[in-house]
Image: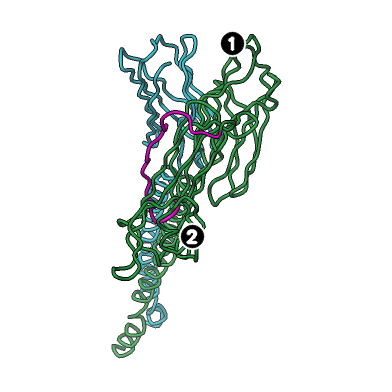
Amino acid sequence: MRRLKCRRGISEVISSVILTAVVLTVGGSVWFYAQSATTVMTNNYVNNTLGLKQEIIERFTVERVFYESGVLHIWIFNYGFVDSQLDIYVTPSVGTIPPSLNHAIGSNNLGYVDIATTLSAGTTLSIKVHSVRDNNVYYAYTVS
Amino acid sequence: MSITRTRYRRKRKGVSTIMGTLIFVGILFTAVIPMFFVMNQADVLLDQSKLTIKHTDDEKSNEFANAYVFPTDPTSSAKITVQVFNKCEMPITIIRVWVNNNYTETNMKINPMCNDKYDILVNAQVGSSYDVRVTSERANTYAVLNGILSYILNSDGSTGWSGENYGINIVIPAKEPWMPTEKWDGPYDNFQVTIWKYDKVLKVKVGLPIYVDQKMTRAVSASESFLSLSEQGTYWVEAQVHMSQKGQAPAKVRPAHWHTIVDGDYTIEWPLGDPIIQVTLYAQDPSLPGCQTPHCPTCIAYNGG
């Protein structure tokens, strides 16, 4: 009887320990889940925003075009704040020219693309420069 | 016994609530609020970029320059000179000079309303021609206004340089202070320009006018009109502004008339001078006592001259 009297509060202690452990486990899990979820959401949002930012600050222009000895030379000036990956589509008034893809031009650099093709004088070319960030620049050139 | 247990339970009743609150506050401060901070920071970066690129685009569209090309020494085929005039309010940096299909990297910094020259070694041969243009740091490309420069064989067997375009650029400046008191026709001020070829020795206008009564209007600010000419030489330029009637009968009346403001000869002597010359129409104040315009009898009669 006396021994039982001594152990009278043990179940209370054990139960409170268990309760605390459960609360900490469940709470920790919720905490961990919330932090993972917000990290993923934040990363997605930041990546999308930074991608949009890169798209906005990308600038390039067709600076010079000339046709000489069976080669069409296209000079592109990247005057934006980011490097660009460009595809060039040339549509002549007569015939077709295959696109020239994946040309990297660094920020503040002048790059050129040479396209071997046969063009007659007076042919008008519509040149479209398309970046992987979905920016487009157009240029018209008439072969002299 | 039962009283003790109840008191004990009552003592522990708030522990889970406190822990739950602590966890909630912990999640709020370690996950949600940082997320909003980082998202907001990304938005700020995006807005900053938008602003920066808007400034870049605005500067690019506001940039304006005129470029000309001429032989460095008219008697030598060695070099050509590109001259760039900055015509805008911002400094311009020319980073490339294109001659035909080749370019030279440069770093010409030109302050507003100033100009700079750049010499290029070409060692021209007879029959060669030079299509010159310049590119600015803001990615604007300016072709030279006087066209393609050629090195040719003249009819007398000598060789020399030849330009493509000559012209007279008529400039009407912004309103002069006295003008609001003068009544002009129409919502804008109307001007007309006539150009003849002029024989400077005989002092006579040669043949029919090349441009007859070319109409120009002055908008809110200064206006320009470029009149192309096929060859260099001396030209007579007459420019007039239309003035409406002043005064009512029986008082003194000045009838509506074309008031002459420029009446003189101008010579294009390229390559020693500019291939394109500028004529600015500074209208004289017709209300001044004794109109000083000798070619305007109407104003002279009205002013009692």
Residue density around tag 2, few if under 14, some if 14–19, many if 20 or more, within 10 Å: many
Report whether B133 appears left or right of A116.
right
Residue placed most toward the observer, B243 or B104 = B243
Percent coordinates x, y for residue B30 in the rendering: 44, 63
Q: Pinpoint residue A35: horizontal percent, then vertical percent.
A: 40, 57
Q: Name the amino acid type tagged 1.
A: Ser
**Any part of residue A83 in sight:** no
Q: Are marks 2 and 1 in contact (CB under 8 Å)?
A: no
Whether the magenta-drawn stretch holds residue B9 is answered as no
Residue B96 on image: x %, y %: 59, 32
Q: Name the foreground residue: B215 vs A97.
A: B215
Q: Which lettered chain is shown in cyan?
A: A
Colour of chain B as rendered: green
Range drawn in magenta: B203-222
Image location of residue A104, percent across then percent down: 49, 28
Q: Which residue is mark 1?
A: B155
Query: Which chain is disc 1 placed on?
Result: B
Question: What residue is shown with label 2?
Answer: B291
Is B298 rendered above or below residue A67?
below
Q: Which mark is residue A81?
A: none
**Amino acid type, residue under disc 2 in the picture:** Cys
From this view, report whether residue B24 is shown above or below residue A125. below
- Name the quadrant containing residue A5: bottom left
Which image quarter holds the N terminus of chain B?
bottom left
Residue in view at x 38 percent, y 37 percent: B212
